[in-house]
Image (cartoon, grey):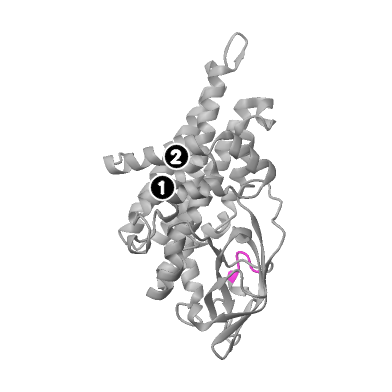
Amino acid sequence: MILSAKYELMRKNFRNFAETEFTTEIQEQLDREGGFNWDIWNKMAKYGFTGCKLPVEYGGQGGDSLAYVLMNEEFSRVCPVLAIYANTPNSLGGGPLLACGTKEQLEKYITPVAKGEKQIVFALTEPGAGSDAGSMTTRAVADGDYYVLNGRKCFISGAPIADYAVVYARTNPNLKGARGISMFIVDMKLPGVSCGKPEPKMGISGYPTSDIVFENVRVHKSDLLGPLDKGYAVAMKTLDGGRLGVAAQSLGLAQGCLDEAIQYSKDRKQFGKPISYNQGISFMLADMATEIEAARCLVYNTAMAKDAGDKNASMMCSMAKYYASEMANRVAGKAIQIHGGYGFIKDYKVERLYRDARVMTLYEGTSQVQQIVISRNLLK
């Protein structure tokens, strides 16, 4: 796909930032030690990346879905962790508020998030409610001007560093499944809110993930987000945008793997010549490049369809996420194979990218969930 000069300039800016600021040293330190790099976050806020897709009137840049995709792709090409830093406020964190927040809520919460002054996360998953989010047990009970929250969320990306969380809780126990669930904006400093120990993960170690526990947390009714008992539909709509973001992350990660594999195949010599001269290697590179370009076309087209209000945009987001995330794992595997034994060593970037790729088929809806969404749209 040929991008206009406007989007090519965006791509260049995203790439320059990632390559110059998110250095190999920072990447390796985060992978080794975990945590969060606040210096990088502050630089991202300075350049407006934390509000890339958020409205100008609330401190954002007002970018569209294609700009959002390009940002995720270019950042993930260098390191998926950087992409997640920028993705959260523009996607799952800010999405529910943009969908149905009041003007007062948008001014109070989105403005500082867009400016990078605050962090907001999306708290849907529970220990017994992953793909089946409608079976959640977290409760919110009305008590005067407040709702009292009790329950536990798990695998919440960014929870240990968050200022706010969009929390989904059951407000009407008489309604089963996806019905009777509401959304609340919860200040993470409220009494009764606590986070578990950050999870030791296979990859994406530079963005902490943990449980959030709610013990008689009193949330004012002004922080009820959207209509009572109808929060689940907003969660699903928000996940559409999040899945597009993961598709773009997968695309960038795969491109990074290909870049590394091409360079290594040119530098590594066996039997007196670079291994790129071997057909077995060159054909793997050809396969990788073809799959990446196919994913790129799908992801970009989905972004434009979403902005155009295409009736199939939701299904296309699932298609993009499904194909790109599975593709990224195939490409990462081939990059390791091309590196041979060196690909198994932590000194080489592809080892880390291979581990980071694995989560792409899991979070924001597994590949199997995407197949369900796609097939149901086809058969309805």
Q: What SS does tag 2 mark?
A: helix
Image coordinates for residue 207, horizontal then vertical, percent: 60, 51
Residue drawn at (44%, 69%), measured in percent from left and top?
A: 97
Foreground disc of the pair 1, 2: 1
Q: What SS does tag 1 mark?
A: loop
Q: CA distance from mark 1 to mark 2?
A: 9 Å
**Residue holding disc 2:** 17
Image coordinates for residue 98, horizontal then vertical, percent: 41, 67
What's drawn in magenta, residue-wise?
Answer: 129-133
Q: What is the three-letter code of the residue carrying label 2?
A: Phe
Classify the position of the N terminus by image quarter: top left
Magenta-colored segment: predominant secondary structure? loop
Image coordinates for residue 216, horizontal then vertical, percent: 67, 80
Residue 329 is left or right of residue 152, and the answer is left
Q: What is the three-letter code of the residue carrying label 1?
A: Tyr
Classify the position of the C terminus by image quarter: bottom left
Of 257 and 131, nearer the camera is: 257
Task: Specify whether residue 324 is in view.
Answer: no
How many numbered circles does the render carry? 2
**Residue holding disc 1:** 47
